[in-house]
Image: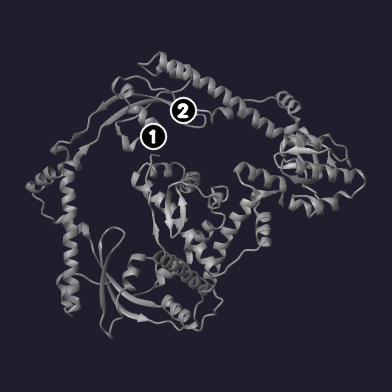
Amino acid sequence: MMERMREGASSIWVKIILGLIIFSFVFAGVGSYLAGGSQQAAAKIDDREISQREFEQSYQNERNRMQSQLGEYFTTLMGDPAYVQQFRRSVLDRMVNDVLIEQRAKELGLRISDEQIRNAIVSMPEFQRDGKFDNEVYNTLLRRSGFSPEMFAESMRTDMLRQQFLVALQGSDFALGNELAALTKLEKQQRVIRNLTLDVAEFQKIAAVSADDIQAFYDQNPQMFTRPEQVKVAYIELSGEGLKTTLEVSEDDAKAYFAENQTKYGTAEKRQVSHILIQGDSSDAKAKAEELLAQLNEGADFAKLAQSSSDDTFSAKEGGKLDWFERGVMDPAFEDAAFALNKGETSALVQTSFGYHIIKLDDVKLPQVKPFADVRDDIVAELREQRAAEEFYDLQTQLAETAFEMPDSLDDAAAAVNANVQTTEFFAQNNAPGVLANPAVMQAVFSPEVREDGLNSDVIEIGPEHVVVVRVEDSREEMVLPFDEVSASVKQQLAAQQGEQAAQAKADEIITALRDGKTDILETEALNFSDAQTISRAGSDRMVAQVAFGLAKPAEGKAVYGMTRDMSGNVLIIALDEVIEADVESVALDSQLATQVEQMNAQQDVMATLDVLRNTAEVNYPTLDTPAN
């Protein structure tokens, strides 16, 4: 129980479930919940379907997310078809869980208000600039993702509805005072133990391994003594990283670069505008916008008109005012009009993909350039980066050409780029040293052109500005090693097996005798238990503590015995002499332990609820498949 409680305390399952539910499909196919179609279903939940397109989109998003987090390790995992199938199933299971939770939340009458959605959107960092919600960023991101504001708001409503249900479920859990006291008492319990070690090495020394045993094991297990195909490799490694420290950048070069690129080292001109938006491109939308422009020309107040008439509901609340922006941020037509105005001027109608705008220039921030001294170090570093990259690619080209033109040796290629030819001893494909372990390098090494024909490989990129060229100097085929070469290791292996078996058997014999009260076996075997020691549940030796705290409480004056192994593999007999109960006062219901118990209970409740929902719904997966990576 205590182990499960610790796992629950540190578990992130509840957080993962909540995190995956809220915004789980933002920019990733949320709109497809709202749009039906005739697509084949990937999953069916009662009358609700998850289309194959929805599933593939969600699968790709989750795959991309895992790839960005785990890198090459995830690529390796995805090379296993069984893992791919398991991964695809987990994504679809999560999508099914989302639908089940959504349906249950609606059955319970849970609702999300428009104000809740608005507050959630304006607080999302994706839509903020300089810590504040930016309506143009919001609209631009939605447009790029193929959503209308209404579609996105509806997807948010669905996600937040699921979160509301899960938070309510999690918040309903509590811990009882007597439960906390009992757990605390278990946690603080101590146990008095003694231990006795049977050294496996001593049993190995007396193991009787015959020549026939060794030969039989060798004959029966040829795969254990098979040396894989091996190669001995020569290679040239070329990296741009070292070039950066050897290149010099003069003061004149840095100043010239600063003069040519001042916009990079200062603030661009920024403008703040207010606007009135009439959505759509119809003649009615244009007529309405023209009418508003006419009212402005007749002296109407821009802010009040924006509040009452603009379809941009977020900026309308602020009188149409938008945040500061610079060129390259807004829709080009909107931006051109805004930067053509003088302060206080109002534009004519401006048409963009959002509709018709009327723009008023509120204020201007002129560009400012930082002093050269403040940015000198950055410029020098950037110039070194650029020049190192240029030199690296020049060297890479020279390396590729020379290695191709002189395919029977790497010496000429090494001389051309002033590098050294490095060599290895024999190695197999699964234990290549250093940079050679890169999958692309291994593929080249064991290709017919390099492995069999003895040619130099092409230049192989193993990282940014990091390449190698390889050639195979020697190779040897897979073979079963001769008996004479491995007989000594076989004997040692058999002795180790026999030693472990003998130590285990002796331990069983000793424990059986001790449980029967025959303590004289210790004297017969010349063995002694250690002095008694008192340990806690979180003792320094976890394996010993796990066994000791799993033994039954001993009767008065009679030890209880168990067995484990130490870190060296030796057999350890444990004698439990006494259980020391802790004096525990009442535990506060707002303590850390109470929170941990509640979290563990919440985790169990969420999983149990999903089990019930799945069991009471008709769920099937008509088309779950595993396409190629």
Farthest bottom residue in view: 556
72 and 169: which is toward the camera: 169
* Position of residue 428 in the picture relative to residue 435 (left or right): left
Q: Is residue 488 left or right of residue 147?
A: left
Give percent across and percent down for residue 587. 52, 80
Q: Position of residue 66 (x, y in %)?
A: 47, 47
Seen as rendered, the residue at the extreme right is: 299
State the residue lying farthest toward the front. 284
Residue at (50%, 69%) from the top-left corner?
Answer: 599
- Up the image or down, 242 lies above or below 91; here it is above
Quarter of image, res 613? bottom left
Q: In which quarter of the image is the C terminus?
A: top left
The residue lying at 41 percent from left, 16 percent from top is: 404
Q: Is mark 2 on a helix, strand or loop?
A: strand
- Does residue 57 show up? yes
The residue under label 2 is: 467
Which residue bears the numbered disc 1?
439
Amino acid type of disc 2?
Answer: Val
Dot 1: element: helix
Q: Percent position (x, y) of residue 25?
A: 54, 51
Q: In the image, which is nearer the foreground, mark 2 or mark 1? A: 1
In the picture shown, does residue 368 fall above or below 212? above
Residue drawn at point x = 41 percent, y = 13 percent = 405
Give the left or right position of residue 268, taking residue 107 as reference.
Answer: right
